[in-house]
Image: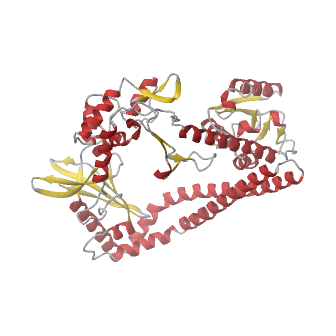
Amino acid sequence: MYKQSSYEVAVYCRLSRDDNNGSSVSNSISNQKDMLVDYVREKGWNVRDIYIDDGYSGTNFDRPEFKRMIKDIEIGKINCVVVKDLSRFGRNHAKLGYYTDEIFVDNGVRFIAINDNVDSNKGDNEIVPFKNVINEWYARDISKKVRSSRAINAKQGKFLGSKPPYGYIKSPNDKHQLIIDENVVDIVKRIFSQFYAGDSGRNIAILLSDEGIPAPRAYHYQSLGKTNPITSETDAWGSNTVLQLVKNRVYAGDMVQGKRVAPSFKSKKRNTVPQEDWIVIENTHEPIVEREIWNTIQERFRENKRTRVSYSGEVSLFSGIVKCAECGSAMAFNIKKSGTREYPIYRCGKYTNNGKKTCSIHSISMDTLERIVLEDIRNNARILTDDEIVLMDKLVKLNDREQEKALSIKKARKKELSNQCDTVSKLIKQVFAEKMAGNVSDDMFKDLLADYQKEQEKAKNELESITSNIEKIQTETNNISDIVVKLKKHIHLEKLNRTIIAEIIDSISVSEQYNVNGVPHQEVKINYKFVGCLESVKLCS
């Protein structure tokens, strides 16, 4: 690497709750910042910017300030990164190696970890991968201890969540004990009372919203004096919120935990746990609703459980495919009654759930939608039959932009995975070397080796999958040709079915009605697989 006398330096600091529960003075953000700034100034370099991720784990690199720093590196704003030690930079050895050995090198960035005596300009950092291994092993060990402690506490009936259920607060004397929130307990009781009496979740939600009562999440942030970070979410109640509340066993006085679990200490993802494996402890706190009432409501759910199906008992024709053009939510299958007549319709799912404050009531009958889609398929089939070249040219142009974007993303991920596989292979060799030198215990060696081999296998599998996806994207024209063939064979199609729709249609959007010269219109967009919307259909009602 080219050595220079002055640098534009990025000072990077990180601290999470895993770091001695945030109580370590030496690791505090202020201490890190002061130490690093003094170091840079003593060198006579320029502190270009300071990047601080406070409260973020080192096991992943999805941190806002870290990502901002990488962007500044890529545009040439930064040519040196200084951290207190390698663990402040990160505790995922493969990802850390990817940034220090690939991204920084490619962008001519010097990397310094002061306390670990790491300096990429010195060229004597062979021990860095092993230090990264130790940092990751530490994070994994802490994760195991935390999981074990949480499991023990859950089996003792202690509340472990960060946010108590609506209607409860944490006891000021014991954060693991729920007590009733007197501010909203009457609202919870009212919801159970109305639902028990036969009122619907949707009607209860509309009444609560009309009275200006904040929904649970909105109430939670209001009680903290904070703004809801989900800006797209309203304060209104939804039928789903009401239904989830009356299904929650916590209101009968029981604690149910362990519903989701992280597959790895490196992952933010949470996998759903089978119900039989949940941790259920009865009578852990004061109930808000009588157990008999709660049981009666749950029995009603079991009796009324049904899939949204058509008259034939099968999944409705456009289920999961037809969307609301205004809010983007799925349109729900319903049976509309008009006098003695019943007929199937699709209605905006968000309106159905949350009412008129979130979207309009607009709908479309299934018969009308079926007729529109059938005509559009036959029309495009006729065009293909008459002039296939013209439509093929149109399809290719529609596809090019999305293809290029997807290909770029997947190629970048392929490079990252290839580098990760190489890094893990080097680390496996390093661990064997350290074991032979007596620097690693048998237990630690076995744990690390098993973990690396598992990670290597996972990376290789994803690499194979993404390579296959790239090949698939690069041959997208073949997919377009395939759609053309499938469309052409439907020129005389008489009736739609789920198989045909799933074969050629990706999604359908339906607008609310609007007037043109006093005549009501409604727009339907049919998005075909690989090629998108060929033509909007304007329906005169």
State which quadrant residue 215 falls in. Answer: top left
Q: Position of residue 505 (x, y in %)?
A: 37, 64
Q: Nearer the viewer, residue 347 or 482?
A: 347
**Residue 7 visible to the viewer:** yes
Rendered-image quadrant of the N terminus:
top right
Q: Nearer the viewer, residue 533 or 161?
A: 161
Residue that appears at 36% across and 39% down: 245
Q: Position of residue 442 (x, y in %)?
A: 81, 52
Q: Position of residue 523 (x, y in %)?
A: 27, 54
State which quadrant residue 186 falls in. Answer: top left
Q: Nearer the viewer, residue 414 or 235?
A: 235
Question: Is residue 13 toward the left or the right of residue 123 in the image?
Answer: left
Residue that appears at 39% across and 70% down: 390
Question: Is residue 396 toward the left or the right of residue 185 in the image?
Answer: right
Relative height, residue 406 to residue 135 (above, below): below
Rendered-image quadrant of the C terminus:
bottom left
Residue that appears at 40% across and 40% down: 249
Question: Is residue 69 toward the left or the right of residue 151 in the image?
Answer: right
| Label tally | 0
Q: Position of residue 323 (x, y in %)?
A: 33, 53
Question: Is residue 298 toward the left or the right of residue 77 in the image?
Answer: left
Q: Nearer the viewer, residue 233 or 272?
A: 272
**Residue 350 visible to the viewer:** no
